[in-house]
Image (cartoon, rainbow, N blue to C red):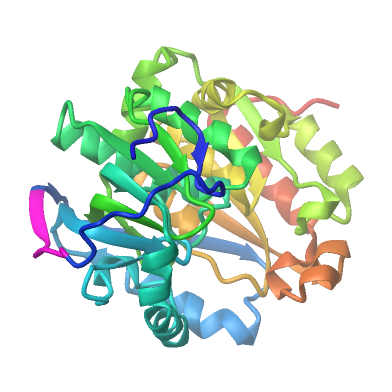
Amino acid sequence: MKWKSRGNNFAGTGARADPNRDTAMTDRVLSSWQSPALRLPIPMVLGEPLHPVIARSQQEAWGRASWPERDLRIVAIDDALVTHNGLVFRGDGSVVEATAKKFSREAIAGAAERHASDRDAAPFLDMEGVLCMRPGGTCYGHVLAEIMPSAWLVRKLLPGRQAALLIWSPPALVGLYGAIAAAISAENMPLVNCTRPVRVRRLLVIDGFAETDVYLSPRVREFADEIIGMLGVRELVATRRLFLPRREQQGRCVRNMVEVSACLHRHGFETVYPDELPWPEQVALFRQASHVVGIQGSALTTTMFSRPGTSVLSLAPTRMFDTFFWRIAGCCGLSYQELRCVAHEGMRSRDTGRLLDQDIEVDVALLEAWLCGLDDESGMRVAG
């Protein structure tokens, strides 16, 4: 049975079982494309020293930032079972290694034990599907930079391919997947929101493009550039200075927001919450940015549409391990620095227990000094 409408959901019971139950075939590489070698500089980090809990891991991650050329491959798996937020098994019960990198051994073993029963119960998609699922698929940043490039690569390397885009998304994000698909000319590839395990006649898996906290292909810049062209925002003038705070329920919000906002506004920054805008307008907003100061979080991902050379200052608590936004900046030619801040328990971190969700207190004097440096470079006069 084929689902042809955008936004279908496998939570229903109208799917049929496939009679050809054990027909798994050898994986095949349908196409490949070389990803250039990449070397990223260690970022300048201002403010508080990294907390000892993460300092070693963070420094090692920055210090290992050199990767040789690699192939980005589109691999076809026949009669695949997609389960566990993007974990994929072949018909014989073996796991597809390219999909297993962010899962623990225990999670993989548990899914393998359920393989036979999940296959029997799973609805069957009688067409090709592109795997646009992985851990982090409910987060805007990972959807944009690591997941939807899979659809772009299939459309680019296998033009005219009729395939569904298999996603795993809360309802609020389905529209985002659709907007990105339209911006890469993949609007004819229906979205299938897999809210339960599903079998697919032939699954296309992108191998080598991204691995969270480990690697992001420099080809992400071409992905962003195509979207910029499709949305007609390439020639927008980069004159805006953006400040991207976070709301209290999101965590990592600024405790001394009044002082920080006043400091930034004196230097020509405007406070924006990009998620209040339609997604194409978010792309246009960041295309107009000459400078961005933002708390580490999803909104910073959209800097990938900013012009090369755009200055980005990322604010983060001292206990937060992260290389995601630094990798995006490096791949897209942005000037990236971090300001590490004193952390405080907040509403979100109390709920999650995660140190990276703690609120932050920004050193305003240090921020002021950084902003004055920008103004000296640009010749801008400070108001007031």
| Farthest front residue in view | 19
Quadrant for residue 40, please give it: bottom left
State left or right for residue 227 relative to residue 277: left
Viewer-side residue, 131 vs 92: 92
305 relative to 366, above or below: above
Magenta stretch holds residue 185: no
Pinpoint residue 226: horizontal percent, then vertical percent.
Answer: 31, 26
Overall secondary structure of the magenta section:
loop
Quarter holding the N terminus? top left
At horizontal 33% and vertical 62% (from top left) the residue drawn is 81
Q: How many numbered badges does the structure rendering display? A: 0
State left or right for residue 74 relative to residue 53: left
Quadrant for residue 96, please give it: bottom left
Quarter holding the C terminus? top right
Q: Is residue 306 visible?
A: no
Pinpoint residue 17: horizontal percent, then vertical percent.
Answer: 35, 54
Q: Is residue 26 visible?
A: yes
227 relative to 293, above or below: above
The magenta segment is 23-30
State left or right for residue 26 relative to residue 344: left
Pinpoint residue 63: horizontal percent, then vertical percent.
Answer: 36, 74
121 relative to 372, above or below: below
Viewer-side residue, 377 vs 58: 58
Viewer-side residue, 331 vs 164: 164
At horizontal 54% and vertical 28% (from top left) the residue drawn is 286
Magenta stretch holds residue 28: yes
At horizontal 73% and vertical 28% (from top left) the residue drawn is 270
Pinpoint residue 181: horizontal percent, then vertical percent.
Answer: 40, 30
